[in-house]
Amino acid sequence: MKNNSAGCRLGDPQSRGDRGQREEMGIVMEVRTAASPKDVKHYTTDRLREEFLIQNLFQADKINLVYSHIDRIITGAAVPVNEKLELTAGDELRAEYFLQRREMGLINIGGDGVVTVDGRVYEVNARDGMYIGRGSKDISFESKDAANPAKFYLNSCPAHTEYPTVHIKLEGEPEEGVVIVKDENKVEMGTLEDSNHRVINKYIVTGQVQSCQLAMGLTKLLPGSVWNTMPAHTHDRRMEVYLYFDMDDDAFVVHYMGEPQETRHIIMHNEEAVISPSWSIHSGSGSRAYTFIWGMCGENQDYGDMDNIENKDLR
């Protein structure tokens, strides 16, 4: 598929081009180039959304993917309803199979589902996650109930070696191939008075699930709180992608991005994602409480490696 920086996007008939068999299989991948902060500060609203906002990811019986040149992350979703969906590599990767040179994390934000990796079946239910290591060849997705389908949200980045594939659960007992999120990785932060009371659940982080560079987790805002990641920060050594969900149709999040002294915003709705370059802040305020998934990759996996921005210094 050709680079679509001219504006073709998922769900846009003009973006489909020559996808041949992969589109018939329900797999669509869009490619986006990186953007300079010097250019971004001149973007219109439409251009800002075109470059960083990801819409229409969750479509029935499709795997939709967006390949960003920013740290080569792939953001996507698989929504099996009536069919089993198989993840294959296209010309964008020039690989024999999708994870030949990559690793992948996923979190299920829908109904109960099944992920099969090289013949091993994992029952990945609502809010469960997985880390799937480099070298895994045959990956497929299914739902247990077509009336309440699974919605697998995916992050993938390049990997230099192989680490074990594991099923990640928030609660339960650990067993072979199953990791339970540690209490220390369920972090309650903020206050209702500051409108940022939230619980950060770290799924793929150092000391819990081994990966090459991918980090991933889920943050839930508690009732009455609407702010995430405020005070804001940047981390020059990692980029990040947010997926906002658990929102009503009339709800929205104002996502803040840009350099700390050149901030911009994007209005976002349910089940939409946004790409955040390493030089950009990434914060949001919603019309009501919501949940979001964060995924990071880049130079290191140090969750605490960030440069905090004081509120008084934002512009």
Image: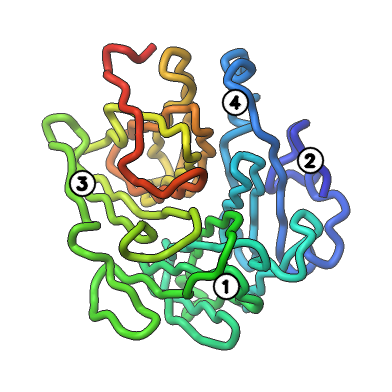
Picture coordinates of residue 58, whole percent (x, y):
56, 56
Q: Is residue 114 left or right of residue 85?
A: left
Mark sitting on residue 3: 2
* Helix, strand or loop status at disc 3: loop
* Helix, strand or loop status at disc 4: helix
Estimate the spatial distance between the alpha carbons at disc 3 and disc 4, rounded to whole Å: 29 Å
> Which image quadrant for residue 138?
bottom right
Residue at the spot x=44%, y=69% of the render? 130
Mark 3 neighbour class, 10 Å CA radius: few under 14, some 14 to 19, many 20 or more: many
Residue 214 appears anywhere in the view: yes
Estimate the spatial distance between the alpha carbons at disc 2 and disc 3, rounded to whole Å: 40 Å
Mark 2 neighbour class, 10 Å CA radius: few under 14, some 14 to 19, many 20 or more: some
Residue carrying label 4: 48
Q: Is residue 80 left or right of residue 168?
A: right
Counting residues from the N terminus, which is met first, the one under dot 3 or under dot 4? Answer: 4
Q: Are marks 3 and 1 in contact (CB under 8 Å)?
A: no
Give the label, 3 or 1, closer to the camera: 3
In this view, 12 is above or below 93: above
The kind of residue on which mark 3 rests is: Leu
Estimate the spatial distance between the alpha carbons at disc 2 and disc 1, rounded to whole Å: 30 Å
In this view, 43 is above or below 192: above
Picture coordinates of residue 205, whole percent (x, y):
36, 57
Mark 1 neighbour class, 10 Å CA radius: few under 14, some 14 to 19, many 20 or more: many
Picture coordinates of residue 303, whole percent (x, y):
34, 46
